[in-house]
Image (cartoon, helix red, strand yellow):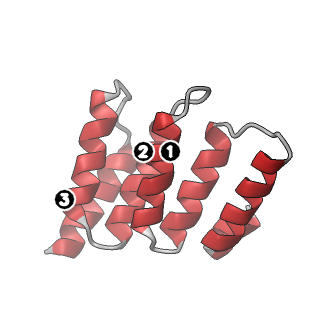
Amino acid sequence: KAFARNGDVAGAERWHLEMKMTGIESDVITYNALISTCARAHDFERAEHWLLEVDGARSVQADGVSYCMCIDACARCGHAARALKWLQRMEAAGLQLSHGSCGSLVHALAKAG
């Protein structure tokens, strides 16, 4: 939580690597923490990276929170088209849209003008 609260992407990624090196499997909560950290740091590309990694994982699946955080990361950076892309992928994955995901998209559209 400290990494996410401070937007310390490098610290969160080091923590994730240490977990993997000790044999601890990442779960959706771990990935969501990484995506959230990236959103707070306004690093939408890293947020997308981690969402793609969780989507490609065999043992864990992205959830609505994963997508909402990635949408939020894009919105914070003013990338409405990317936010919309992730909203569409969320729908395609069969996940239910939330007020948060729609609100983040509206924020991105407003910021984009």
Q: Left or right: where does residue 87 sit relative to residue 62?
A: left
Judging by the rendered image, the residue that carries numbered circle 1 is: 53
Amino acid type at circle 2 is Tyr
Q: Is residue 84 above or below residue 63?
A: below
Q: Is residue 53 above or below residue 63?
A: below
Where does residue 12 sit, x and y in percent of width and height? 69, 64
The N terminus: image quadrant: bottom right
Q: Looking at the image, which residue is at 45% across and 74% down?
A: 42
Q: Mark 2 and mark 3: span between their CA atoms?
A: 14 Å
Q: Mark 1 and mark 3: span between their CA atoms?
A: 21 Å
Amino acid type at circle 1 is Glu
Q: Are marks 1 and 2 in contact (CB under 8 Å)?
A: no
Q: Secondary structure at mark 3?
A: helix
Judging by the rendered image, the residue that carries numbered circle 3 is: 81
The C terminus: image quadrant: bottom left
The quarter of the picture where residue 106 lies is bottom left
Q: Which mark is residue 67?
A: 2
Where does residue 44 sit, x and y in percent of width and height? 40, 65
Give the mark, 1 or 2, whose residue is nearer the N terminus. 1
